[in-house]
Image (cartoon, helix red, strand yellow):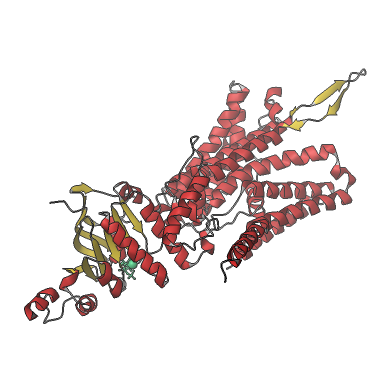
């Protein structure tokens, strides 16, 4: 049996008195899409930022392929194959799409100069895969639409050799056709064996794409279920109240019993 | 749309895109207007005083501008990271003094000058470390360095200039490339061609190197990214602290180089030289299009800005405007430049 790609064990993050993440344990397997849900401020982004090296946990352990890892910067996590689409997108406004796509990992010529021509060509290819209408690659990203900016952030995460993909509300600014494109992309990446954490508020997307859902409430993990065990109402109850409905039993078992 | 009309529409769109390329964007527009200002200044001063447009005065302007330009290039790098370096005037003095003292102590001129530049770089690196490690705002950190470097320069020299540094020390500031001097029969030399002053050559080389660094090298891109959005740059794997440290160290080194050029010009190491030069450097950068909120700025722009400041100072001098009035004018120009920057950045 294969090992989980990544295991988060008893992760905690405190801000003064606030427990943004409170003893959360979670794992991710190859070719699996795990939906991470929760109310605003539940701690989803904090947990994801800890995994992507952007935030150091107050306590807990991260294991990648079974061996303990500690990420002191996003570069460490990237080196371990963890790519992140941040909720804030993390784009440098004055740089163009290609410069942002390769930021921190610039392509260089033999003499160590920036290879802007090659970066532009590569950017054109990978962006076209996500949005065929993406033409203004040379403009500073501050002048692009919210959806175009989001596409750049997504492209940046999938361009490189990714094993674990963290998507923190990746479709928040996208139109329906772009959202569908990202859904296709997620399925495609999953089939390639990449593990994906998908943070989303969109119940429809989650039930469409995810194999498992985990729900956070006030920093704690209140539920982790295979997607066919739960209904949307169950998940909603977990998000809002932090517990399943009193009369809950697994959806798929109920269906079997009814037959 | 029919299929037949499609290629036509596409080529129309393409040619429109090409046309847009010729239309200047905001940054280019800013640089064009700065260039226009520069020409207006030259025109105005030339009309006001005939001596302004002479070869000799041209050389004087070139020398003044080379110091402002060197400081301005370093300042531009720091401003692009979203910081500011208020210490360059004092670091200039300390570097010149350090170099003068080394040469007095018997160090050859070349290594002595290199030592001065190294002292400047060290001051800049210290600025960078204070900003990145101690998380002190750049304004405060470099203000502290401004006092410390000036104090050290004055303390080391007892506030007295170091003179008699030898003819070789003065060559960088006073010499020129391709200067043709003819000995007259009466024993007096006659300058046939004044040549290109060494300080101008130094400035040109530094400007080209800095522009290359900012545009073509990874560290340059990271400097822009850091100033544009520091958190985003960090999340993208840019070592923002390193980019900042680099910019401050460069600013210090170039302040040191400017100090060597200036002291060489005077053939004296003056601990009280360079007071308020940081304002000229900031003005040059901002007039040239650098934004104090970070992420924006170019070396060519700063060069134009440096010439505007240099010509403004020189022209006011030539026109017999008092030093006090000059201060008022330059102060107003600095505020105006920052104001324009502010307007430009309003969404
Ligand atoms: N840098 C920080 N300093 C202090 N508190 C923080 C910081 N970052 C997050 N928090 C707090 O941690 C809690 C969890 O925030 P987080 O961003 O993880 O929520 P979230 O689940 O992603 O919410 P949303 O759905 O709105 O994105 C919040 O109460 C927030 O105020
Ligand atoms: Mg969030």
Residue B318 x %, y %: 83, 46
The answer, for residue B136, to whether it is visible in the render is no
Q: Residue furthest left?
A: A257
Seen from the viewer's position, the closer of residues A231 and B323 is: A231
Using residue B14 as the reference point, say whether residue A193 is left or right of it: left
Q: What number of labels is visible? A: 0
Seen from the viewer's position, the closer of residues B249 and A121 is: A121
Q: Quadrant of the N terminus of chain B?
A: bottom right
Q: For the point 56% across and 67% down, which residue is it? A: B3
Q: Quadrant of the C terminus of chain B?
A: bottom right
Above or below residue A7? Residue B3 is: below
Seen from the viewer's position, the closer of residues A233 and A178 is: A178
Residue A201 x %, y %: 31, 72
In which quadrant of this rendering is ligand 1 seen? Answer: bottom left
Picture quadrant of residue A167: bottom left
Above or below residue B24? Residue B223 is: above
Residue A162 x %, y %: 31, 51
Using residue A187 as the reference point, say whether residue A159 is left or right of it: right
The answer, for residue B272, to whether it is visible in the render is yes
């Amino acid at each position: 049996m294969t090992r989980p790609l990544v295991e988060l064990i008893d992760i905690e993050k405190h801000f003064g008195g606030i427990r943004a993440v409170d003893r959360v344990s979670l794992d991710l397997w190859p070719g699996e899409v795990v939906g991470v849900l929760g109310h605003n401020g539940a701690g989803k982004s904090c947990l994801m930022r800890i995994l992507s090296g952007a935030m150091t946990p107050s306590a807990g352990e991260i294991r990648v392929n079974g061996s303990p890892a500690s990420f002191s910067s996003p570069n460490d996590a990237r080196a371990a194959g963890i790519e992140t689409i941040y909720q804030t997108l993390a784009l440098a406004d004055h740089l163009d799409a290609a410069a942002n796509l390769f930021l921190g990992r610039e392509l260089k010529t033999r003499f160590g100069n920036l290879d802007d021509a090659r970066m532009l060509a590569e950017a054109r290819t990978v962006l076209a895969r996500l949005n065929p209408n993406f033409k203004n690659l040379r403009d500073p990203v501050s002048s692009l639409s919210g959806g175009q900016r989001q596409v750049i952030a997504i492209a940046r995460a999938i361009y490189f050799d990714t094993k674990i993909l963290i998507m923190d509300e990746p479709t928040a600014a996208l139109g329906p056709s772009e959202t569908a494109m990202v859904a296709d992309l997620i399925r495609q990446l999953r089939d390639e064996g990449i593990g994906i954490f998908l943070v989303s508020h969109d119940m429809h997307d989650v039930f469409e794409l995810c194999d498992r859902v985990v729900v956070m409430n006030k920093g704690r993990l209140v539920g982790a279920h295979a997607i066919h065990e739960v209904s949307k109402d169950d998940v909603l109850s977990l998000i809002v109240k932090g517990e399943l409905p009193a009369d809950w039993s697994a959806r798929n078992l109920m269906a079997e019993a009814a037959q | 749309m029919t299929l037949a009309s499609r290629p036509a529409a596409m080529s129309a769109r393409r040619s429109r895109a090409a046309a847009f390329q010729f239309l200047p964007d905001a940054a280019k527009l800013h640089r064009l207007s700065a260039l226009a200002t520069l020409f207006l200044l030259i025109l105005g001063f030339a009309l006001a005083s005939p001596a302004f447009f002479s070869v000799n005065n041209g050389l004087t302007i070139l020398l003044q501008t080379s110091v402002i330009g060197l400081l301005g290039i370093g300042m531009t790098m720091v401003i692009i990271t979203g910081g500011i370096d208020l210490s360059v005037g004092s670091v200039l003095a300390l570097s010149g003094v350090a170099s003068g003292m080394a040469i007095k102590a018997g160090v050859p001129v070349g290594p002595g000058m290199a030592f001065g530049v190294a002292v400047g770089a060290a001051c800049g690196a210290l600025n960078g470390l204070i900003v990145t490690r101690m998380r002190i705002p750049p304004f405060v950190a470099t203000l502290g360095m401004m006092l410390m470097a000036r104090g050290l320069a004055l303390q080391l020299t007892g506030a007295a200039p170091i003179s008699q540094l030898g003819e070789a020390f003065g060559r960088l500031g006073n010499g020129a490339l391709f200067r043709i001097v003819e000995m007259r029969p009466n024993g007096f030399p006659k300058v046939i061609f004044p040549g290109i002053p060494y300080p101008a050559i130094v400035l040109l080389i530094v400007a080209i190197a800095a522009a290359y660094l900012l545009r073509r090298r990874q560290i340059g891109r990271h400097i822009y990214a850091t100033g544009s959005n520091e958190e985003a740059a960090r999340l993208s794997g840019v070592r923002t602290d390193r980019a900042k440290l680099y910019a401050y160290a460069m600013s210090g080194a170039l302040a040191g180089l400017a100090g060597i050029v200036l002291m060489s010009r005077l053939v004296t190491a003056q601990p009280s030289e360079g007071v308020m030069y940081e304002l000229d450097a900031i003005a040059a950068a901002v007039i040239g299009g650098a934004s104090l909120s970070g992420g924006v700025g170019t070396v060519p722009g700063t060069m134009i800005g440096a010439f505007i400041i240099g010509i403004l100072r020189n022209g006011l001098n030539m026109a017999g405007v008092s030093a006090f009035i000059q201060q008022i004018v330059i102060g107003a120009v600095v505020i105006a430049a920052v104001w324009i920057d502010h307007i430009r950045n309003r969404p």
